[in-house]
Amino acid sequence: MSIWKRALAAALILACTAMAAAYPNPLPVTGSIFVHDPTVVKRPNGGYLLAHTGDNIALKTSADRTAWSNAGVVFPSGAPWTRAYTGGSANLWAPDISYRNGTYYLYYSASTFGSNNSAIFLATSTTGASGAWTNRGLVISTSTSSTYNAIDPNLIVDDRGRWWLSFGSFWTGLKLIPLDPNTGLRSGTAVYDLARRSGGTTAIEAPFIVKRGAYYYLYVSWDACCQGAASTYRVMVGRSAAVTGPYVDRAGRAMTAGGGTEILAGHGSVHGPGHQAVLADSDGDQLFYHYYGDDGRARLGINHLGYDSAGWPYLH
């Protein structure tokens, strides 16, 4: 092999190594770690309650954020009110859990793959335990004639105490609607545009908004989910001074025009990381997400989330 070919090969190896090391591996987790679309809340007792996609919505608990145990399902007797959107399936998607004023709030999706005949519902509980949840009703629905898709909900309460729900997947992107804080259900008819893809693909979903410092940060997932180790999901972020936007990426590009700054993508045996959630914990912010292993199974991923000197998030 010539000198220049050896140099080129060495450079390629270094480049691949640098790419593989661009993002940290997930922190160690043990026990019941096979999840999809995780959402988590810190409980009053200091433990953790996690909900994720599954039949009747699956629950897991942990005392230390490392060892996880199954904790049953939200609706052990089923959720027949969702069946008009799921084609009769018990599988419910992409929950969003939070704890406010002594009550757990759980927003969750009912749909079938590739369809926007979809709905988001709300359930509440004072304990978060399996079977202790009360259905509070429909929040928003879409049909096959809609221009957006009512899945992947996330609750954000802004600095003024106003409640908002972000949601969306593909079609015309991610949306935001106001909620009534007294009921947790939709208030009015306003719909705000948050983000969408451009340039030949509409693959954006899973919004999650969190306020840190002067900014609201909008985390989203781009590209292909749900294809096992072939998934190309990745986590993007933008920020805004107002909860309703406009959100822009690090380069100043609007997220409604395809903008987004990547903070996590596949690397090594971590395939298609996405459907992220941010948890404020005693040791700082944590990013929860799912990813696929080489065997194609979806696993729980957790990483520490930091902010650089310009206020942009990164994983470590």
Image (cartoon, rainbow, N blue to C red):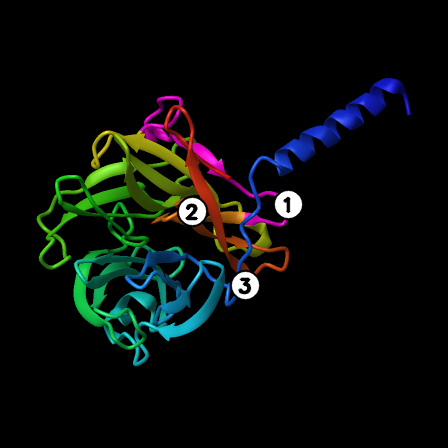
Give the crowd class for mark 3: few <14, some 14-19, many >=20 residues within 10 Å: few
Residue type (three-letter) at the residue carrying disc 3? Thr
- The tally of labels here is 3
The answer to whether residue 205 is above or below residue 56 is: above
Residue 37, by quadrant, is bottom left
Give me the residue at 25% from left, 30% from top. Answer: 214
Q: What residue did someone put label 3 on?
A: 30
Q: Secondary structure at mark 2?
A: strand
Cα–Cα span, label 2 and label 1? 19 Å
Of the residues under marks 2 and 3, which one precedes in the sequence? 3
Closest to the camera, between mark 2 and mark 1, is 2
Q: Where residue 289 sits: x, y (%)?
A: 45, 51
Viewer-side residue, 283 vs 101: 283
> Cα distance, mark 1 to mark 3?
20 Å
What residue is rendered at 25% in x and 43% in y?
A: 175
Q: Amino acid at mark 2?
A: Leu
Q: Tag 3 or tag 1, which sits nearer the N-term?
A: 3
Q: Which residue is mark 2?
A: 287
Q: Is residue 255 part of the magenta span, yes or no?
A: yes
Q: Which mark is residue 268?
A: 1
Q: Is residue 41 above or below residue 72?
A: above
Q: Is the C-beta separation of discs 2 and 1 under 8 Å? A: no
Residue 260, horizontal then vertical, whole percent: 40, 32
Image quadrant where one finds the N terminus: top right
Judge by depth and name the residue closer to the eye, 316 or 185.
316
Part of the protein shown in magenta: 248-271
Q: Residue at x 59, y 55 (%)?
A: 293
Q: For mark 1, does the 10 Å Cα neighbourhood hold few (<14), some (14 to 19), or many (20 or more) residues?
A: few
Q: Does 55 appear in magenta?
A: no
